[in-house]
Image (tube, rainbow, N blue to C red):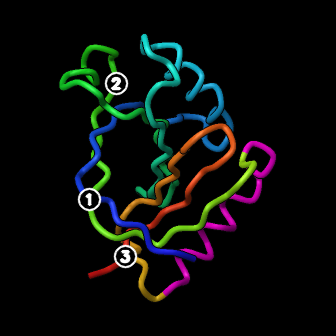
Amino acid sequence: MQTYHVAEDIAVFGNPVTTFPDGINEAFTALVNKVPDGLNRSYYGISFIASGHIVYIAAAEEKERGEAEKYHCEHYTIEKGDYLTVPVKDWRTKTDTIRDVFHELMEDPQADKNKPCVEWYKNDDEMLCMIKKAR
């Protein structure tokens, strides 16, 4: 486990995956196809518990103000600050183990369990599992 510092809030846009855990790949594919520069931006998975259920958001980095509205998506913010992280190499072959990585992160006493879990898809090979550190 490592610490990663997010220097500024990250504006993202996307929509909840209504069929979670199924439908995540389709949600990201639809999002990539929706924006003109496709894969030339960062993508994130944001998850949290609401009313006893996991809410999962497939999200893209907002490069220009107003993209959320332009692409008929919801706007979200990934808060700046320090995050506990675990990198996952070759993540496409390990999607069934991602929840275990987040369980490990959540067990750390430094984890802020009131903040969302964040998946940062850095590229086709590496994904960073992140949970904000408590102050």
Furthest residue to the left? 65
Residue 36 coordinates in the image, percent (x, y): 42, 10
Label ID, residue 73: 2
Residue 127 falls left or right of residue 4: right
Furthest residue to the right? 93
Furthest residue to the top? 36
Residue 90 coordinates in the image, percent (x, y): 75, 48
Residue 27 figure quarter: top right
What range of the chain is rendered magenta? 92-108
**What's the distance in space between the residues labelled 1 and 2, CA to CA?**
25 Å
Mark 2 residue type: Cys
Crowd around label 1: few <14 · some 14–19 · many ≥20 (10 Å):
few
Label ID, residue 7: 1
Q: Which residue in the structure is indicated by mark 3?
A: 133
**Is 62 above or below relative to 47?**
above
Residue 39 falls left or right of residue 74: right
Instruction: Classify the position of the C terminus by image quarter.
Output: bottom left
Badge nearest the viewer, 3 or 2: 3
Badge nearest the viewer, 1 or 3: 1
> Is residue 119 part of the magenta span, yes or no?
no
Residue 22 coordinates in the image, percent (x, y): 68, 37
Crowd around label 3: few <14 · some 14–19 · many ≥20 (10 Å):
many
